[in-house]
Amino acid sequence: MTKALIVGGGISGLATALVLSRRGIEIDLVERAPRIEALGSGITLIGPALRALDGLGIYEECVAEGFGVTDFEIYTPDGVLADKFPLPSPVGTGQPGLLGMMRPTLHRILLDRAEAEGAVLRTGVSPVHIGPAGAEVEVAFDTGETGHYDLVIGSDGLRSTVRDLVFGPAAPEFQGQCVLRVVLPRPAEVTAEVQFRPAGDVTVGFTPTSADSMYMYCMFPVEAGYRPREEDLVDLVRTRIEPFGGVVARIRDEVREPGQINYAAFETTLAPGPWYRGRVLILGDAAHCTTPHLAAGAAMCLEDALALGEEIAAAPDLDDALRAFSSRRYDRCKYVVETSVQLSYWQTHPGTPGADHQRVMAEAFGRLAEPF
């Protein structure tokens, strides 16, 4: 039986463990953190992500745990509806075109399914050496153990240990912008994916996550190395959203506790292809970490897992499968990273000649709806 090591217990690692276990591959998954978990903020899953969830067999469970929407609404900064367009479902008639849910919920579903399929998961473990050993890959861990595998997959995020060990160190690219994600009660009128046109260099939007909850995202420029103190988070959010009217103004007083708020600065990476060296492969954020401007990061990670499973099933051997996977995924993921970075730049540089945020987003949603 083929034996694979997956390094990283995020969305891409868990989804890949689920897919490959179903292909009859013996899976060891190691995560350097003490627990496999996700931050307690919301996540937006666009059409390609829903299609991937369906391919993974967890679509219905995710929809039941989240809030599906069929429209995208755009408002002026003072809260007036300026545009609205439908989000067609990639799964079937009557199904949502976008799903909001809490990140820990999605993580739990993936984790439970991966374990149910037989993947062996260990936490507090990280590789310190990866090298060839005949036809296999030898991996030394920080626990002092050594293992031999037919395939090693680095799905360990933006600061990937596997990528650094095998492909060489690669510093993430800071994009000069951040996001504050705030978990809030959902007003009854928020039933669509909502985005407000910028007020200066601040962009705000909402994603419903359940019958009674949503998350707000607030994006604005920051300097490299900036990180707000926890005790300043509430005032920071309230100050940044103060120029906005409509629903934003009405929920402003609901921002009360630092525990509602998650801060993240935008850093990206796009590893040069091919994304494999011998029998070592990187995927997910380790290969193509994007900003959230297209809400496509999770979609690309989930697609990676499905594509790898399909290529392994179709190819005569693992080497051909890795070659086909890397070729299949590179251009699509590169498009997501580069388009998202462009949108981020326009937001942090208001008045840039030729900037057309809405057109580029609409084009991207159409392109990403195509088969992968």
Image: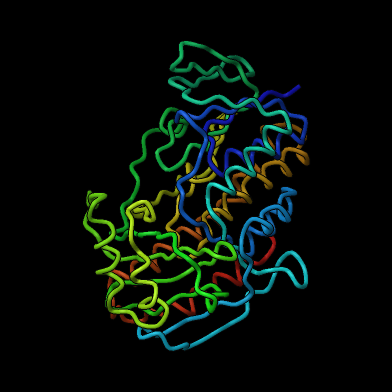
Closest to the observer, 113 or 296: 113
The spot of residue 225 in percent (x, y) is 22, 49
The spot of residue 114 in percent (x, y) is 67, 36
Q: Quadrant of residue 244?
A: bottom left
In the image, what residue occupies the spot 50% across and 30% down? 31
Q: Can residue 97 be spotted in the picture?
A: yes
Colour scheme employed for the rendering of this structure: rainbow
Closest to the observer, 94 or 265: 94
Closest to the observer, 170 or 220: 220
Give the quadrant of the C terminus. bottom right
From this view, report whether residue 297 is shown above or below residue 367.
Answer: above
Give the quadrant of the N terminus. top right
The spot of residue 349 in percent (x, y) is 27, 72
Label count reads 0
Q: Tell whether 44 sits left or right of 318.
A: left
Q: Tell whether 118 sits left or right of 335.
A: right
In the image, what residue occupies the spot 43% across and 31% down? 161
Closest to the observer, 163 or 234: 234
From this view, report whether residue 110 is shown above or below residue 294.
Answer: above
In the image, what residue occupies the spot 40% across and 69% down? 343
The spot of residue 152 in percent (x, y) is 58, 28
Q: In which quarter of the image is residue 323?
A: top right
In the image, what residue occupies the spot 35% across and 55% down? 266
Q: Can residue 339 be spotted in the picture?
A: no
